[in-house]
Image (cartoon, rainbow, N blue to C red):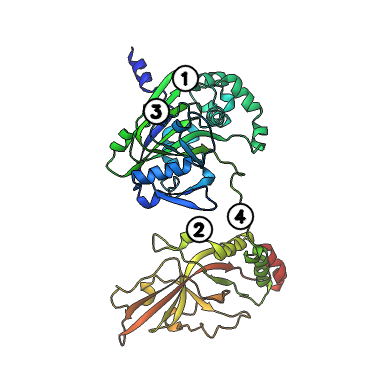
Amino acid sequence: MGKLDTVRAAMKPRPPYCCGTLPVTPERCVLFYSTGLDDHAGKINLLSATSEELDHFTRSCRAQAPTTNEDFRSMPVQLNATEIATTFNAEHYRLTDVIQNELLEGGNDKRPLQLLAQDLKVYDTGCHERSLTPVPATDDDTARQPGLLDACLHEYRLLKRSEDSRMFSLSLSEFCEVSGISFEDACQFESSESHAREDTTTQKGFATILVVFPTYAEGGALLLRQRHHEWNIDFAELFASTADVSVAFVAFYDDVRCGISTVTSGHRMILTYRLQFPTGNDIPLATLDQNGAYDVNSLKTGITELLLDPNILPGGGYLAFGIHNQYTTTSRSVVSVGSHLKGRDAVIARALSALSIPWSVRILYRNVGWTEFSFLTDHIIDLSSHGEVHDLMGTLGNPEIVYFVRERGEPDRKRVKLDEDVVGKDATDIMLVSTRPSAWSMHTQYVAGGGEVMMGNLYGDVCIIAERPLIANEEEGSDSEKVESTT
């Protein structure tokens, strides 16, 4: 074998399955199950259950199975998804992420995945399963496996999409040969794909996931076969490979046949999931009660009428909307909060953006004590560890001073206090639109030095600050036309 052949041999296709272990805690392995007696349910912890409890559970479930098959005692006990509920949550443990990284390749490793619980099977002493089929029909004919075909052909489409920029390309027939799927089936699937998407009964799953709980069992190994290749997965070896209390998992494609060897002692508990690429119709969307919904259109109309009023901030300025929710920020700046507003805050932001009104999330501070004035800033201020402050404006970095006004432009007597000796006469008018205080506020104290030492206080409220443009005078056109053109 040449050097190139050695490298190529090392890059041979991975097996059509992946397996491993997942550390779990007892509270995440509780199983509730139907007892078949009226509406009664049973409960068992699959991590701490004793042999006697597992025997009782198995007998109870087997008694519900109406069958006269001679091989009944060698068949596993099966409870369908509608007959069980478990605190084990595969998505909580991000099991799909692990499987996606290991089992899927190319563009498929970026597609969202969905897990659907199928059943729980219990193999007690003497039980085995020669052909544990993950889907109702799993012939070698891949036409019976549309989910698996979809996974393969999705990768082919991605290859063709960027074909011009690649060093090599494959025809569909060559791709099918490399992937081990039937070219005829692929052509048939491609031609009927649009109809299959409309058919909600089409099987979308392409793989099966088995989650095995660490109950005591001898035997009960998993046997996998794909064409002429076979693999044997011993769950006892998987459990022994980790020091943590864990469940074992195995994921494999639909063209892989599987079976369980005979359990010679104990109980083998296997929870089965189907793995599929979800579509928009898989999970119905919640319908929001309009009585409790925020009306963006009404808010847009109200803001427009407010801005068309020539008496509202005729010299330009700001409209302040108090924040209604708490947010977190990784720095002292609050500007980034504007990208993930929620609830009523998000509705206000959408309305302003729809009207092309510039806005941002800023902090409206009021200085109280030593001298009184208000200002806007983009970041949280903390002067608690600062020494004596003699030049407050310099310490604050000469912030933007604002002057509170009311609806008709008259000073807001409750908030208008402004020490012009400290901040000067240049201040931008600002009007509070919200009647409630901001839900996100802050306070810092500092020592104010001067003729006499006293405490100063800064009270901040995080707000959505919208810019109100300057209204044009009569010579430039009517006030209404000017505002309408800017909004």
SS at badge 4: loop
Of marks 1 and 4, the one in the foreground: 1
Mark 3 vs mark 1, CA separation in Å: 19 Å
Q: Which amino acid does label 1 sit on?
A: Arg
Residue 90 sits above or below residue 324 on the image: above
Residue 245 locus on image (x, y percent): 31, 44
The reply to whether discs 2 and 3 touch (Cβ–Cβ < 8 Å) is no
SS at badge 2: helix
- What numbered label is drawn on residue 457? none
Q: Which of marks 1 and 4 is nearer the N terminus?
A: 1
In-front residue for pair 148/173 = 148
Q: Earlier in the sequence, mark 2 or mark 1?
A: 1
Mark 2 vs mark 4, CA separation in Å: 21 Å
Residue 126 locus on image (x, y percent): 39, 31
Mark 1, residues whose alpha carbon is within 10 Å: few (<14), some, or many (≥20)? few
Q: Which residue is drawn at 47% across and 66% down?
A: 326
Q: Residue at x 52, y 50 (%)?
A: 37
Mark 4, residues whose alpha carbon is within 10 Å: few (<14), some, or many (≥20)? few
Identify the residue under disc 1.
Answer: 227
Q: Which of marks 2 and 4 is nearer the N terminus?
A: 4
Mark 4 vs mark 3, CA separation in Å: 45 Å
Q: Which of marks 2 and 3 is nearer the N terminus?
A: 3
Identify the residue under disc 3.
Answer: 261
Q: Which amino acid does label 4 sit on?
A: Ala
Residue 175 locus on image (x, y percent): 53, 21
Residue 448 sits above or below residue 209 on the image: below
Identify the residue under disc 2.
Answer: 340
Identify the residue under disc 4.
Answer: 286
Would residue 23 be seen by someone viewing this image from the given angle?
no
SS at badge 3: loop
Mark 2 vs mark 3, CA separation in Å: 53 Å
